[in-house]
Image (cartoon, rainbow, N blue to C red):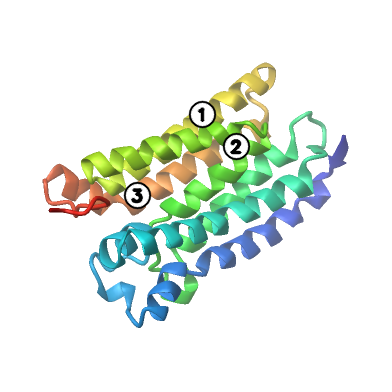
Amino acid sequence: MKILEINDLWYFAVAAVVCYFIGCFNFAVLIAHFKKKNIREMGSGNPGTMNMTRSLGFKFGLINFFCDALKGGLPVLAAYLLFKNYVFEGTEYSVADFARYFFGLFVIIGHIFPVTMAFKGGKGIASTMGVFIFALPCESWWYIFIVVAFLVCILLYIVLTEWGSMGSLIGVTLLSVFQAVLFVDRYAADMFNLWSILTFSLLLLINLLTWTAHRKNIFRLLAGEEHRTAVRKRK
């Protein structure tokens, strides 16, 4: 294993800026533009997957989901490939375990608070899903089947209940917990290592960001006024 020295941590400052601006690119706005529509003036006005599905149909919602998932996932994959053979100086903690979620967090921040859209972006679910879709199989390739199983369960929940936002939030939370359990098992002997604490903090921040971005949806859901996400065609 190679050592990442303290003096090399400036790499993460550069990565934060790059990943933030990657996150600022909004596919919902672009896809809707090709349809000669403004997604910010349709439905809930949110430039994200759920509003695309409600406003333009399941096909365009799915296209948007895949684009946003790649936006969140590719930087995560890059982080893993760059740092998979490194540990932090003075520890046995894998740099890749921290870097994956550090890169992913700043993509999500860029998606939710894009400087290119006056800091009013999407709610980050698809990009967050992309982070986990790419990050978890870095643990072991067959984890992709677990991720797919999660996604199928989330989709079934949304189809059956039509509560798209809640289904997505539950999915993100469960994937976070699954990853956290893997890290607890891996670093059980050194749980209070600084980098271990920071990595768990990243997972918590990702959840706080996505749940906070959906606070209005949660309030509407509790009040029985939430917008339905109808995937099935109504008769």
Tell me which residue sits at (56%, 56%) in the image.
Answer: 70
Disc number for residue 136: 2
Query: For mark 2, does the 10 Å Cα neighbourhood hold few (<14), some (14 to 19), or many (20 or more) residues?
Result: many
- Residue 48: in sight, yes or no? no
What is the count of numbered marks? 3
Q: Nearer the viewer, residue 186 or 190?
A: 186
Residue under pointer 1 = 178
Residue under pointer 3 = 212
Residue 36, compared with residue 222, is above or below; it is below
Mark found first going from the N terminus, 3 or 2: 2
Amino acid type indicated by mark 1:
Phe
Residue 24, compared with residue 1, is above or below; it is below
Q: CA distance from mark 1 to mark 2?
A: 9 Å
Tell me which residue sits at (21%, 54%) in the image.
Answer: 233
Mark found first going from the N terminus, 3 or 1: 1
Mark found first going from the N terminus, 1 or 2: 2
- Side of 62 where 51 appears, left or right: left
Quadrant occupied by the N terminus: top right
Q: CA distance from mark 3 to mark 1?
A: 21 Å
Residue 85, compared with residue 226, is above or below; it is above
Q: Are marks 1 and 2 in contact (CB under 8 Å)?
A: yes
Residue 3 screen position, x and y as percent: 86, 39
Query: For mark 3, does the 10 Å Cα neighbourhood hold few (<14), some (14 to 19), or many (20 or more) residues?
Result: few
Residue 124 screen position, x and y as percent: 43, 55
Q: Nearer the viewer, residue 24 or 49?
A: 49
Mark 3 or mark 1, which is nearer to you? 1
Q: Quadrant of residue 190?
A: top right
Considering every residue shown, the one lying at the far top of the view is: 189
